[in-house]
């Protein structure tokens, strides 16, 4: 939550690498809500213990509070999230609040979870 508060004051931070930290669902929600006012280009939330619920909170935060125009790369791989989380991300990138410059999304669930064939093909 502290990092999310820093992002809201436009601190000039371009890359935030939180891989293998315990961001969890609440932290993901706070970061999603803070992205609209940040200058981030890269956000790495891989292996951060974010579940399907946290992915949903993150995406809702982006949708409600506005997307980060400059965000180019979003890493969510290695989290305990599956098809429901992937669907939330797909809805975000296909919706009207999609970060305009987003070029890369990495989303592969942590073992033993797997995406269904239908979701993986999307």
Image (cartoon, rainbow, N blue to C red):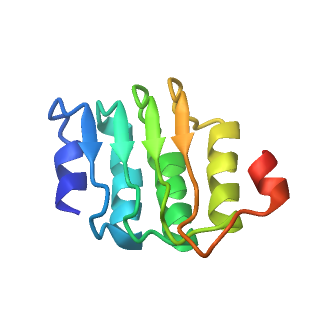
| Quadrant showing the N terminus | bottom left
Q: Does residue 110 sit above or below 94 in this rendering?
A: below
Residue displayed at 48% across by 53% down = 76
x and y percent of residue 72 in the render? 45, 29
State left or right for residue 20 relative to residue 72.
left
x and y percent of residue 42 in the render? 35, 35
x and y percent of residue 57 in the render? 50, 64
Residue lying at the far front of the rendered structure: 111
State left or right for residue 62 relative to residue 95.
left
Front in this rendered view, residue 89 or 67: 89
Q: Does residue 83 sit above or below 36 in this rendering?
A: below
Residue displayed at 17% across by 29% down = 12
In terms of image quadrants, where is residue 18?
bottom left
State left or right for residue 75 relative to residue 1.
right
Residue displayed at 31% across by 34% down = 40
Residue lying at the far bottom of the rendered structure: 112
In terms of image quadrants, where is residue 48?
bottom left
Residue displayed at 27% across by 65% down = 21
Q: Does residue 86 sit above or below 40 in this rendering?
A: below
Task: Tell me if residue 95 can be seen.
Answer: no
Q: Does residue 79 sit above or below 121 in this rendering?
A: below
x and y percent of residue 104 in the render? 53, 33
């Amino acid at each position: 939550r502290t990092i999310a508060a820093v992002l809201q004051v436009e601190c000039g931070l371009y890359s935030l690498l939180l891989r293998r930290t315990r961001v969890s669902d609440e932290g993901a929600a706070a970061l999603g809500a803070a992205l609209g006012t940040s200058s981030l280009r890269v956000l790495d939330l891989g292996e951060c213990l974010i579940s399907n619920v946290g992915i949903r909170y993150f995406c809702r935060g982006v949708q409600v509070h506005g997307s980060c125009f400059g965000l180019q790369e979003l890493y969510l791989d290695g989290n305990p999230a599956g098809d429901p989380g992937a669907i939330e991300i797909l809805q975000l990138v296909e919706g009207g609040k999609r970060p305009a410059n987003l070029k890369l999304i990495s989303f592969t669930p942590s073992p033993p979870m797997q995406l269904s064939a239908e979701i993986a093909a999307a």
